[in-house]
Image: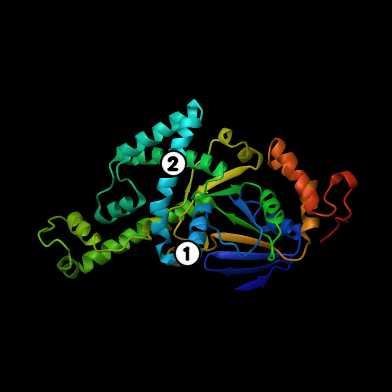
Amino acid sequence: MQWRDPLDKASWRESDGVTRIVCRSIAEFMAVHAKHFANQRNLIYRGHASFRWPLESSLRRVIRTRMASSGDDMNHLPLMAQTDFPTAFSEFLERLDALGDRETRDQIRDYYDLWSKSGHATTLEEFKGLVTGNELPFEQRQARHRLRAAEFQLLAIAQHYGMPTPLLDWSQSPFVGWYFALREQSAYYPTVIAIAPGVWGATSIRWLKDSAQKLRVKIDKDSPEWFAECSDQSIVPSTTAERRAAVLDTYDLTDTPEYASFLQFPASSHLNDRLQAQQGILTRHSVAHSMEEIASVLQHDMKTQTLIWKFVLVEEPREKAMTQLRMMNITGSTLFPGLVGAGQLGLDSLRFEGYSAKYGWPYHFGSA
């Protein structure tokens, strides 16, 4: 579907849970955003230098690149992540425990303590519990939630220091997103992506419960055939939950936790001073799939509308757009506290002609 709003010039295209909005200038983006998105206060934003870049974590990107260079089968990417990342993360935590402050060491020890208490309280186990009717005990669910929160904080530290993680950085400001989209040169159009984390979280939970219910119906309907294929014939399931659990052993549930893997926890801003300066938000995602791939599945299965908005800048020069952001006080010096910010400001002044405020801006900022 493609249409034009008579009150703005941007063109819209919706497909598989993703809506792409093409804007000719930052001014046009502001008009579109003010009209259609200003009241949606729960949106968060991320900038990409190219509209072709998928929404994927640095961990997925690093492993995918490594596998591509080695000629490995990309279908094995989730398995590679499941085996390689825990080892790398454990090594990072060991060094952090040795070098970090007392608060960080306490966090690491709490994390391992919660890990032992949570048992096998994973998303996959939660899904199996929904199918069989054997939900995880309350104490285990509570420990699992605290474990995820503790792990999220440690992943935020790891990402801050350059380690690939399943986290993505977002901002509550679309103009911070535009800064990161524009500051790197690319052969393709700079893009700002917006999502509603509350919608993603709720949709993921509904998808998990709906998928479990569909599987329960299928197992119960086809029970004679499924029971005949049970690998261990000595087991004679006596209850409904046991029968369903026996059948689950024959299912390939690899993608089940991945499609319902969206998580958001508040990351402590004192661990990363850039989070506060950039109005930052962190979310955790699947390594097996990009967010576009997951949006397509959720949109098809749950009959949702748009889950991802992509604003693409197609005409306005990067120099002019960056200078407009500087007039809003969106610069490297404000987004990167300390001396790092001073260096980023100098880098941007060298990258973009007419960017430096010291010599004035050459562009006329009238209507787009």
Q: Going 49% across and 38% down the picture, which residue do you hit?
A: 153
Q: Going 66% across and 47% down the picture, which residue do you hit?
A: 173
State the mark number for residue 368: none
Mark 1 or 2 closer to N-term?
A: 1
Across and down, in percent, residue 107 comes to 44, 32
State the mark number for residue 91: 2
User: Does 247 sit left or right of 207 as displayed?
Assistant: left
Q: CA distance from mark 1 to mark 2?
A: 24 Å
Query: Contact (CB < 8 A) between labels 1 and 2?
Result: no
Across and down, in percent, residue 312 comes to 67, 63
The image quadrant of residue 213 is bottom left
Of residues 347 and 207, the one nearer the viewer is: 347
Task: Give the answer, above or below, for where 62 lies relative to 328.
Answer: below
Q: Is residue 328 among the parts visible in the rendering?
A: no
Q: Residues within 10 Å of mark 1 (few under 14, many from 20)?
A: few
Across and down, in percent, residue 88 comes to 44, 46
Task: Give the answer, above or below, for where 199 lies relative to 188.
Answer: above
* Amino acid type, label 1: Ser
The N terminus: image quadrant: bottom right
Q: Residues within 10 Å of mark 2 (few under 14, many from 20)?
A: few
Instruction: Tell me the SS state at disc 2.
Output: helix
Judging by the rendered image, the residue that carries numbered circle 1 is 70
Instruction: Tell me the SS state at disc 1.
Output: helix
Q: Going 68% across and 60% down the picture, which residue do you hit?
A: 190
Task: Give the answer, above or below, for where 277 lies relative to 364.
Answer: above
